[in-house]
Image: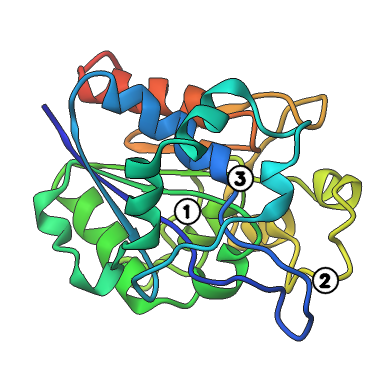
Amino acid sequence: MSKIMIVNTSTNNFEGTSKPTGLWLGELVHFYDYFNAYNHEINLFNIDGDTTPIDPVSLKPLMLDSVTKAYFNDESFMELLRNSKSIEEANPTEYDVIYFTGGHGVMFDFPNNDTIQHAVNEVYNHDGVVAAVCHGIAALLNVKDKNGRYFIDKREITGFSNIEEVLANRKNIVPFMLESEIKRREARYSKAKIPFTPYVKVDNRLVTGQNPQSPKQVAEAVDHILRNDV
């Protein structure tokens, strides 16, 4: 049994606006559900502790699939999101996997968080798996190794694409375009030919998923690594 830490946003609005954002619930649920079925130990964290805000768009009927809806209606699970610990309380030396969920909130509180950067290096350097989906890849943008090299430099990676940001009608209110920032750090970025279809890249013990359609596939890839299948 592996020990998994999941990190969510604490940001509930696009900076400088009253437009709500937060965690894209399905990106948490589908990953969580996959490993919960095998009784792995899973701990939820966010940046500031306490309530994890949920992006209301992720709860709309067209977005809320049956699995996510079941968790949303599960009071004990939702209580975990209402009473999350801050990532500052986590001990990354204890974990086999660290997984970063998405939702636009992470674009504001993930990239420059020192605790996140330390946790990524700690988990990866003790042979653990680092995983992220959609905008959650923002957590990896500014992680550097002891030599000052970007963690994602030259790595095969994906993440929410520029065209998906345009199609989501968020281009003008996000602080940066994730695909562009990934490329600026000289990662080997790729994406699905069709927007909003599942797409995952694996580079050693780094697993990234492109969009909200990809968290289950990210979980499967992480599981393969844990089982020494790759």
Res. 203 in view: no
Q: Nearer the viewer, mark 1 or mark 3?
A: 3
Whether residue 31 is situated above or below residue 37 in the rendered picture: below
Quadrant of residue 117 in the image? bottom left
Side of 78 where 173 appears, left or right: right
Res. 5 in view: yes
Which comes sooner in the sequence, label 1 or label 3? 3
Which comes sooner in the sequence, label 2 or label 1? 1
At x 64% / y 25%, what residue is drawn? 65
At x 78% / y 71%, what residue is drawn? 19
Side of 94 where 80 appears, left or right: right
Q: Which numbered circle lies on residue 134? A: 3
Instruction: Read off the residue under disc 1.
Output: 152
Instruction: Read off the residue under disc 2.
Output: 173
Rendered location of residue 80, percent (x, y): 32, 52
At x 20% / y 17%, what residue is drawn? 227
- Quadrant containing the N terminus is top left
Whether residue 189 is situated above or below residue 123 in the rendered picture: above
- Quadrant containing the C terminus is top left
